[in-house]
Amino acid sequence: MNRGAPHEVPDDGLSTAERRRRPALILNTGHGKGKTTAAFGTALRAWHQGWSIGVYQFVKSGRWRSGERVAFEQLDRTHREAGIGGPVSWQTLGAGLTFRRPGADRGEQSAAARRAWAEVSAGLAAERHDLYVLDEFTYPLAYGWLPVDEVVSTLARRPGVQHVIITGRDAPQALLDIATTVTEMVKVKHPFDEGQKGQAGIEW
């Protein structure tokens, strides 16, 4: 196990400690399963380090009670009551999956995405969290609900050491360009293709 050691160390004058303090922008994209799952796996590591975590879900509505949400709410209580780990703020700010229905009016979802992005922008400006998970954030960009240039500029210019993880399909090139880590989940096989619906403990 290489414990995260790079193959080559650039001659840029930075110490190992300085390199480890650089802010990460991690993008999990592609049509395969596991984008959000991977994001919350990283968030668990961040919680263990005592980081403040902000989760912003851009599509799911507040009616969606996923296993991750319940678990992280419990981790936040553990932090507040026992001083273990870090605080967690979970905001489910979408309007649901209505925009995927034929003939759907996307106005409500678009407005919800703008409100959610305003919350994230304010948090970044105030350096509110150490780690932000922007779940399904690529969809508001792909559907034109948020201006890509503004989003990319805000993320690229965020102050301090604030790490961001973004999930979702069809990430725009401008977002790929500023990301420090990009992983594309490639679907090889999925039960949905054979008509199976989502399973508790697997999809939520």
Image: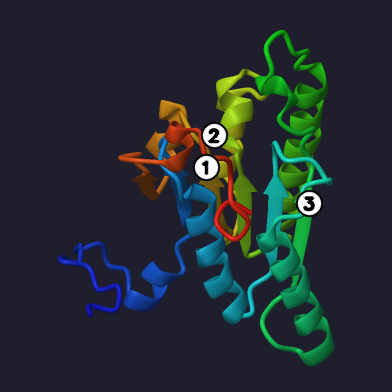
Vertical placement of 54 versus 145: above or below?
below
Kindly identify which numbered label has been placed on residue 91.
3
Give the spatial CA distance, label 1 vs label 2: 6 Å
Kindly identify which numbered label has been placed on residue 96.
none
User: How far across and how far down the image is residue 148, in percent?
Assistant: 57, 25
Q: Nearer the viewer, mark 3 or mark 1?
A: 3
Q: Are marks 3 and 2 in contact (CB under 8 Å)?
A: no
Q: Residue furthest bottom?
A: 82
Q: Are marks 3 and 1 in contact (CB under 8 Å)?
A: no
Within 10 Å of disc 2 (Cα), the crowding (few <14, some 14-19, many 20+) is some
Give the spatial CA distance, label 3 vs label 1: 23 Å
- Residue 32 quadrant: top left
Vertical placement of 55 versus 177: above or below?
below
Tell me which residue sits at (75%, 65%) in the image.
70
Within 10 Å of disc 1 (Cα), the crowding (few <14, some 14-19, many 20+) is some
Name the amino acid type tagged 3: Gln
Q: Nearer the viewer, residue 202 or 55?
A: 202
Name the amino acid type tagged 2: Val
SS at mark 1? helix
Tell me which residue sits at (36%, 47%) in the image.
183
Tell me which residue sits at (70%, 36%) in the image.
59
User: How far across and how far down the image is residue 74, in percent?
Assistant: 76, 75
Q: Residue furthest front?
A: 195
- In primary-sequence order, the first of circles 3 and 1 is 3
Q: Is residue 102 left or right of residue 92?
A: left
Q: Is residue 45 left or right of residue 130?
A: left
User: How far across and how far down the image is residue 120, in percent?
Assistant: 72, 45
SS at mark 3? strand
Q: Are marks 1 and 2 in contact (CB under 8 Å)?
A: yes
Q: Which residue is mark 2?
A: 152
Q: Which residue is mark 1?
A: 156
Give the spatial CA distance, label 3 vs label 2: 21 Å
